[in-house]
Image (tube, rainbow, N blue to C red):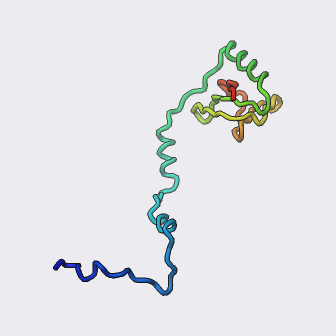
Amino acid sequence: MGKYDDILNMQPPISGKHPKMDIADRAKQFAPFAALTGHEAAIRAREKIVVDKIELSEDAAEELDRTLREIQRGMLVKAVYFKNGEYLEVTGMVARLNAIERELRIVDTVIPLEDLLFVERLSI
């Protein structure tokens, strides 16, 4: 006879105070927990390689200007732009192109035209 044979086949106790927890709620107890909120983002920020902003050549600036004149609201585009020491890429529908305020809005991303490096029209 083993050490725990007397309790191995017993039914688990049922609480009279607390209702039985469903399986989905039980699984949430064991979900990953980030004790240090923002810690992972801070580590990524320190790992980021800061780059200088690229000054467009006259030809590249003219090509970008030509492409911007063709862009209309609702078009699908891909854009590369400079922000906070790095180049970011966004793909989406053009929500707004404002020549007066000099900004391009792709979905919810607002890009100042002076920070735009490249924009390309995409076909659906």
Is 29 on the left-hand or right-hand side of 55?
Answer: left
User: Furthest-front residue in view?
Assistant: 9
93 lies above or below 10 = above
- Which quarter shows the C terminus? top right
How far across and down, in percent of the image, does residue 17 sit? 50, 86
Question: What is the tally of numbered marks visible in this picture?
Answer: 0
User: Furthest-right residue in view?
Assistant: 100
Name the residue nearer the viewer: 112 or 79: 79
User: Furthest-left residue in view?
Assistant: 1
Q: Name which residue lies at 65% across and 24% down.
A: 117
How far across and down, in percent of the image, does residue 11 sit? 36, 81
40 lies above or below 111 = below
How far across and down, in percent of the image, does residue 45 sit? 51, 42
19 lies above or below 65 = below
Q: Quadrant of residue 114?
A: top right
Q: Quadrant of residue 75?
A: top right
Is 48 on the left-hand or right-hand side of 92?
Answer: left
Q: Name which residue lies at 64% across and 34% down.
A: 90
14 lies above or below 57 = below
Q: Name which residue lies at 51% across and 56% down.
A: 37
User: Furthest-bottom residue in view?
Assistant: 16
Q: Name which residue lies at 64% across and 20% down.
A: 55
- Which quarter shows the N terminus? bottom left
